[in-house]
Image (cartoon, rainbow, N blue to C red):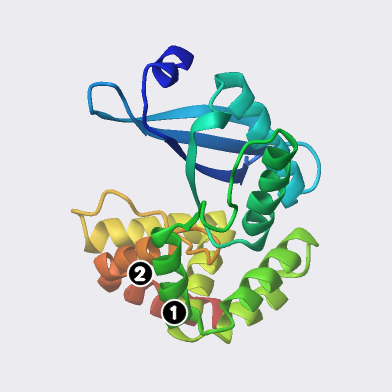
Amino acid sequence: MVSQFKSCDYPVHFSFDLWTSPNHRAFFGLVGHWIDCYGYLRTALLGMERFQGPHTGLNQAEMIWQILERYHSMYRVGYFTTDNAFNNDTALQELGHIFDAHSIPLDPIKARVRCFGHVINLVVKAFLWGSDHHVLEASAATLEASGTSNLKILNLWHKRGALGKLHNIFVWILRSPGRRDRFQDRVQHLLPHITAWTPLVGNVTRWHGDVDAIEWAFEIKEGLDNFVFTAVREEQQ
């Protein structure tokens, strides 16, 4: 990889993000994008590092610098594409200070490119959940992390209209093994062509989660309506 960078006269552009694994370990990923000496676009994962400490811009900047040093690419840095999180702004500012300390020019404002996919995601979430969707994200995450009663979490989603109610229906089905089995039997009986029957619970913090849940709900609408109507009557008796 280092030899590829050295043999090319074009700048290297980067994208980066933080990710938390299911076992609650944080990782930082840095991807390089460049044109090689033959004119072909190249993309490579330059670093997938275990991230220690708070997710501050300074910590991210120091990790970016370590990876850049590893590939000797700090002198040919182009642009950085990231999502719109505030700490990414800070990361570029702090990275600018590190570059200044090494007498390498880097304008953190000009070098910052905002991910268009994330912008579209924010627009869609505003349509689905309202302009204060960030409040829902924070509230849901806080309640789930604190082990709050399920009723409070369900009430939080219930206030968000039809999509919130769909979320609660799927959570209600998944919460009981017996209910899941009865739901599977009902869907398979009414819609034998359906192979995936497990409810897809949308999530405001995950891209495409709500879209997948809505599409799946429409696909199994007949079975879902039938099951909910019957199950509610049975559990009220």
Q: Residue at x 39, y 68 (%)?
A: 120
Q: Marks 2/1: CA distance?
A: 11 Å
Q: Which residue is mark 2?
A: 214
Q: In the rendered view of the protein, which quadrant contains the C terminus?
A: bottom right
Image position, residue 214 (x, y; %): 35, 69
The image quadrant of residue 153 is bottom right
Amino acid type at image mark 1: Leu
Circle nearer the viewer, 2 or 1: 1
Res. 207 mark? none
In the rendered structure, the answer to whether residue 103 lies left or right of residue 164 reads: right
Mark 2 belongs to which amino acid? Ile
In terms of image quadrants, where is residue 33? Answer: top left
Q: Measured from the top left, where is residue 140 in percent x and y?
A: 66, 69
* Residue 38 horizontal side relative to residue 99, left or right: left
Closest to the observer: 183 or 47? Answer: 47
In the rendered image, residue 35, in percent from the top left (x then y), is placed at 31, 31
> Which residue is pictured at 43% across the width and 21% down the height?
5
Circle 2 sits in a helix, a strand or a loop, which is it?
Answer: helix
> Please, which residue is most extreme toward the left here?
193
Q: Label for residue 128?
A: 1
Q: Kindly tell me whether residue 128 is visible in this rendering.
A: yes
Q: Most extreme residue toward the top, as rendered?
A: 3
Please determine whether, in this image, residue 122 is positioned above or below residue 66. Answer: below
Of the residues under marks 2 and 1, which one precedes in the sequence? 1
Image-based side of 14 in relation to 222, left or right: right
Numbered-mark total:
2
